[in-house]
Image (cartoon, helix red, strand yellow):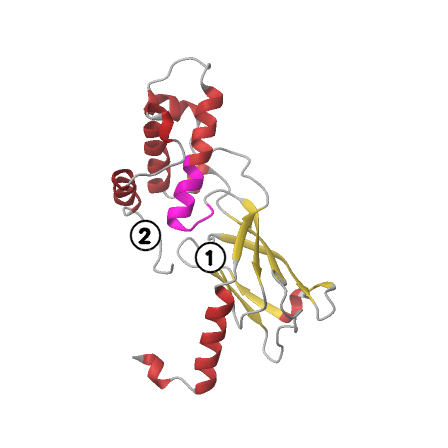
Amino acid sequence: MSNFWQSPSQFHEIAHDRMVEATQRYTRITTPEELLVTLDEAKSVCSVFGNDLDALLSSLIVEATATVEQMVNKSLLLSQWKLTFDYFPNEILVKRPPVRSVLSIVYKDLNGNLHACDPEVYQVSLGGWKDPARIKPVMGMVWPITAMNTYEAVTVHFAAGADSPQEVPPGARRAVKFLVAHWFRNRETVGTVTNDIKNTLDLVLAMEDWGDYE
């Protein structure tokens, strides 16, 4: 109902940001230094003894972690990412929490040349596990004009994720262990999540409050 009280300019800003968001793309630049689930934990849920299957279990942990991250729209362990847009929105929402820092914002000008935005001209609200980070110009400033009809004219580099597995919500770790055990016993299905498995994962992940945004 509150939208009916917004001014025409506010409607325009909302429509603009929705169009820009449709062009966004997330790319992980660095991988976490640790596994979300230890090899010993994976061996326990898979009833494995010895070290012969360590490489397989490690790959399953990485794959399962990526799957759970996609389901909850989070960066579970500390990594560097880039977020690209075809042009600037009014407010940038970085939906890979918990965002730890915004490293840089780079854009292509009308001539296609790259420039870094001065951190003094924009403000950042990092949020937490439940909320996206928000970035917008400080009062009196606007985003630069970018190259026309150019893909990925704006790039936001940021760091997101917990410092250690112990800081990750327990529900995510339980989901990863469940998925590792499932794929270990059904290796022909590695990388796929059937409806039954997804329903189980949803139940496990629902034990945590991940926030309301999409």
Which residue is pictured at 43% across the width and 81% down the height?
11
Q: Nearer the viewer, residue 60 or 47?
A: 60
Q: Which residue is mark 1?
A: 95
Question: Which three-letter amino acid code belongs to the residue tagged 1?
Answer: Lys
Looking at the rendering, in which quadrant would you find the C terminus? bottom left
Main secondary-structure element of the magenta-colored stretch: helix
Whole-percent x, y for residue 196 in the image: 25, 39
Sort mark 1 into few (<14), some (14-19) or many (20+) by Cα contacts within 10 Å: many
Whole-percent x, y for residue 26 in the image: 53, 53
* Upstream in sequence: badge 2 or badge 1: 1
Badge 2 marks a residue whose secondary structure is loop
Q: Which residue is mark 2?
A: 209
Which residue is pictured at 45% across the width and 40% down the height?
66
Badge 1 marks a residue whose secondary structure is loop
How many callouts does the rendering have? Answer: 2
Indicate whether 164 appears above or below 108: above
Could you say which quadrant of the image residue 154 lies in? bottom right
Residue extending farthest front: 149
